[in-house]
Image (cartoon, rainbow, N blue to C red):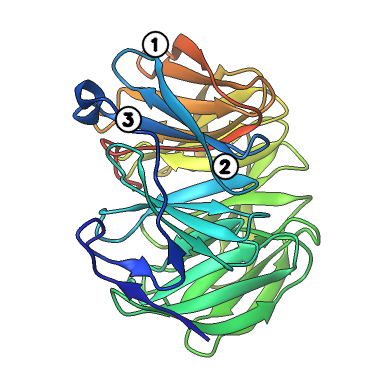
Amino acid sequence: MSVFVRRSLLVACGLFTAFSAYAAAPVAATTTAANVVVVLNSRDATISLLDQATYKEISTFPVGKEPHHLMPTPDNKSLIVAAATGDSLYFLDPKTGQIQSQVKDIVDPYQIGFSPNQKWFITTGLRLDRIDIYGYDGKNLKLAKRLPLPAMPSHMAFSADSALAFITLQGSDEIAAVDMATQKVKWIMPIGKQPAGIYMTPDNKYLLVGVMGSDYVAVVDWRTQKIVKKIKTGDGAHNFRPQGDKRHVFVSNRVAGSINILDLNTLESVGSFNIPGGPDCMEITADGKTMWVTQRWLKKVSVVDLASRKVITTIPVGRSPHGIYFNNRAPEL
């Protein structure tokens, strides 16, 4: 079974064959050049577009059910939005947020990710207890394997050489390592209650895992499959966003209503600040000065000045806002 990506004027890396053209609400010329913030409202099945400069809503439009996560294509010509229970992917212009195409029959794409070498594309099926592995040649995607995993495969990370994919298993309190050459499980290890976000350190030495059912980040030596440290953060340790300096990474604590700053050299928490209402996904401006964070339980996005660690403003959005993205972003290093 294959899904082909064909080149077009809109998407340099292409669009899937079984796509349907989608007419999005036009973005005004005055905001097209501005940096648009894309927010996924998972319970409303909508996307909100915000103006980064004015903190105002530009528009909101419908997509498939439960849009949770998003990521740019390797060439940064499109932004992929995964609608989990809508069983579809949407391709957006990453600068304006306008829909380029819809891809149907991609089943249960909760989280999505490209391997570092761009040869593989993975979707995690949180409700179906499996991952789908696609081969990727730069323009075509071909389904290589549907791999069953223990309960609720959620977030993912890769080894630097793309040999292994690491998947958190929220329902079985484990992480799994998948061999990308054989598409088989290499190992599974216990990690802690309800693991969620997972992040590979820039030196490829450790995995950081947010243990959402507790209050810490587990530091894993993935070569020996051992937890070497637990960094106390806050209840509901959930997701990660690097600052872009190869030194610091943020972790959101959904239950505690806080965000911790971790030093990757010392593997210690070096600070925190409060963000109420279930802080979840975070995005950082290219200059590293400002964070935008979704608040799942408050239907809001907060904008934070990272120097003072103070909230600049909050912006109303839809229900259960989850993924967030803008084009002028700090690198995920």
Marks 3 and 2, Cα distance to the nearest angstrom? 22 Å
Marks 1 and 3, Cα distance to the nearest angstrom? 24 Å
The image quadrant that residue 321 belongs to is: top right
Per the image, label 2 sits on a secondary structure element best described as: strand
Of mark 1 and mark 3, the one earlier in the sequence is 3
- Mark 3 is on which residue type? Val
Q: Nearer the viewer, mark 3 or mark 2?
A: 3
Per the image, label 1 sits on a secondary structure element best described as: loop
The answer to whether residue 225 of the structure is visible from this angle is yes
Q: Label 2, on which residue?
A: 239
Marks 1/2 in contact by CB < 8 Å: the verdict is no
Marks 1 and 2, Cα distance to the nearest angstrom? 22 Å
Q: Label 1, on which residue?
A: 308
Per the image, label 3 sits on a secondary structure element best described as: strand
- Mark 2 is on which residue type? Asn
Residue at 30%, 61% in the rendered image: 74
Between 23 and 242, the one nearer to me in the picture: 23
Q: Label 3, on which residue?
A: 36
What's the mark number on residue 85?
none
